[in-house]
Image (cartoon, rainbow, N blue to C red):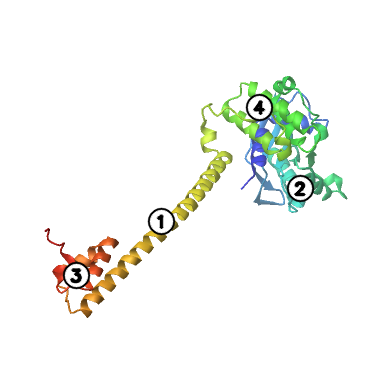
């Protein structure tokens, strides 16, 4: 299952293609600033060498110029550049060839220039992925790295561009700027007017990127989100959150079962011992009565079998050792 960091970053880049293409200008100057429109497509990409084969990127988007007038009078949008976006949070050697297929698929889909852009926030994962293309840099996808995302350590600046601040916090999470960036972003989120779902996703994404010792340095008042806010549809049904709720439920259930098992075992042992003593008392009582020649009728047999009072069974056994009749065993003595 995709990780919270993967899903959080994917949510961010899907909602903010303008941020994605601003980062793309670090690699390709000809993407004009005038591209304000974007066209997203299904993440199913045709493999140019085999059109019947489909490859899957995390997200696919194109930058589009304003439509131009064609000779037939139709206004046709001009796609300037297409990107296959990949969120990479773990090592995967298959990306050595699939990332190339994604770039080719984007070109085939949008019929314009296209590349694969990789968001790999973990320095080790990013470095190892880059090393796969070390000897052939022209075949390499575009890797976003922290140098393209200068630290944002003031909440006012973070509030001015929250998506950029969140992405910066994630990519600076293994640098000396990790805690100041996270604090500024979390404080900005707390002051923002974003809806609860989006705010919660960004909030959790920032925290999920930090190590425990970094988390411990985040003030509690900005580390916690206001749980009094109503839960939205995404909070209640989204895979990212449902997973957490399910894990919490399963952990609680397991704890409850374990506690119940322990309590049940203790109670079961006690009940088992009690029933064992009762059974043994009945067997000894019946044996003594037979040895003494006192034959049980059906009524007395049922009286013994139905008795669950160990004290009473022991009393009957004591009486049976000297009694001459069944009445002396089972019937209470007459007063006086």
Q: Position of residue 259 (x, y in %)?
A: 48, 51
Q: Which of marks 1 and 4 is nearer the N terminus?
A: 4
Q: Position of residue 90 (x, y in %)?
A: 72, 48
Say which quarter of the image contains residue 143. Answer: top right
The residue depicted at 52 percent of the width and 48 percent of the height is: 250
Q: How far separated are the C-alphas under marks 2 and 3?
A: 87 Å
The residue depicted at 77 percent of the width and 51 percent of the height is: 96
Q: Which residue is more in the foreground, 124 or 222?
A: 222
Q: Mark 2 points at which residue?
A: 100
Q: How far separated are the C-alphas under marks 4 and 2?
A: 42 Å
Query: Is the residue 80 above or below the residue 307 in the image?
Result: above
Q: Earlier in the sequence, mark 3 or mark 4?
A: 4
Q: In this view, does 52 lie to the left or right of 245?
A: right
Q: Earlier in the sequence, mark 4 or mark 2?
A: 2
Q: Which residue is more in the foreground, 85 or 258?
A: 258
Which residue lies most toward the right here?
135
Of badges 3 and 4, nearer the viewer stands 3
How crowded is the residue under tag 2: few (<14 C-alpha within 10 Å), some, or many (20+)?
Answer: some
Q: In this view, does 250 lie to the left or right of 189?
A: left
Q: Name the residue under label 1.
A: 267
In the structure shown, which secondary structural element does the residue marked by tag 3 occupy?
helix
Q: Earlier in the sequence, mark 2 or mark 3?
A: 2
How crowded is the residue under tag 4: few (<14 C-alpha within 10 Å), some, or many (20+)?
Answer: some
Of badges 1 and 2, nearer the viewer stands 1
| Quadrant (top left/top right/bottom left/bottom right) for the C terminus | bottom left
Can residue 320 be spotted in the picture? yes
Q: Name the residue under label 4.
A: 222
Q: Mark 3 points at which residue?
A: 301
Query: Is the residue 22 above or below the residue 191 in the image?
Result: below
The residue depicted at 57 percent of the width and 42 percent of the height is: 244
How crowded is the residue under tag 1: few (<14 C-alpha within 10 Å), some, or many (20+)?
Answer: few
In the structure shown, which secondary structural element does the residue marked by tag 1 occupy?
helix
């Amino acid at each position: 299952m995709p990780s919270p960091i993967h899903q959080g970053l994917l949510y961010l880049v899907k909602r903010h293609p303008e941020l994605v293409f601003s980062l793309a200008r670090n690699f390709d100057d000809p993407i004009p600033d005038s591209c304000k429109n974007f066209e997203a497509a299904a993440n199913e990409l045709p493999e140019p060498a085999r059109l019947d084969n489909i490859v899957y990127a995390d997200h696919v988007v194109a930058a589009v110029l304003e439509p131009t007038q064609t000779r037939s009078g139709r206004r046709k949008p001009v796609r300037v550049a297409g990107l296959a976006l990949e969120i990479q949070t773990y090592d995967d050697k298959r990306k050595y060839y699939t990332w190339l297929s994604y770039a080719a698929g984007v070109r085939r889909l949008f019929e314009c220039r296209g590349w694969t852009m990789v968001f790999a926030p973990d320095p080790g994962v990013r470095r190892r992925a880059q090393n796969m293309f070390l000897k052939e840099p022209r075949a390499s996808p575009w890797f976003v790295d922290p140098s393209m995302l200068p630290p944002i350590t003031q909440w006012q600046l973070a509030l001015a561009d929250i998506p950029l601040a969140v992405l910066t916090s994630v990519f600076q999470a293994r640098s000396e700027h990790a805690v100041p960036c996270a604090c500024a972003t979390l404080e900005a989120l707390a002051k923002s007017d974003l809806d609860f779902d989006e705010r919660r996703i960004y909030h959790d994404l920032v925290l999920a990127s930090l190590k425990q010792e970094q988390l411990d340095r985040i003030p509690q008042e900005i580390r916690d989100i206001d749980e009094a806010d109503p839960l939205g549809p995404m909070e209640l049904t989204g895979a990212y959150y449902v997973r957490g709720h399910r894990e919490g439920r399963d952990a609680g259930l397991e704890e409850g079962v374990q506690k119940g098992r322990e309590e049940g075992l203790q109670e079961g042992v006690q009940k088992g011992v009690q029933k064992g003593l009762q059974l043994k008392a009945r067997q000894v009582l019946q044996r003594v009565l037979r040895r003494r020649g006192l034959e049980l009728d059906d009524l007395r047999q049922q009286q013994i079998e139905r008795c669950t009072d160990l004290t009473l069974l022991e009393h009957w056994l004591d009486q049976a050792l000297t009694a001459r009749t069944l009445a002396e065993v089972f019937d209470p003595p007459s007063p006086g």
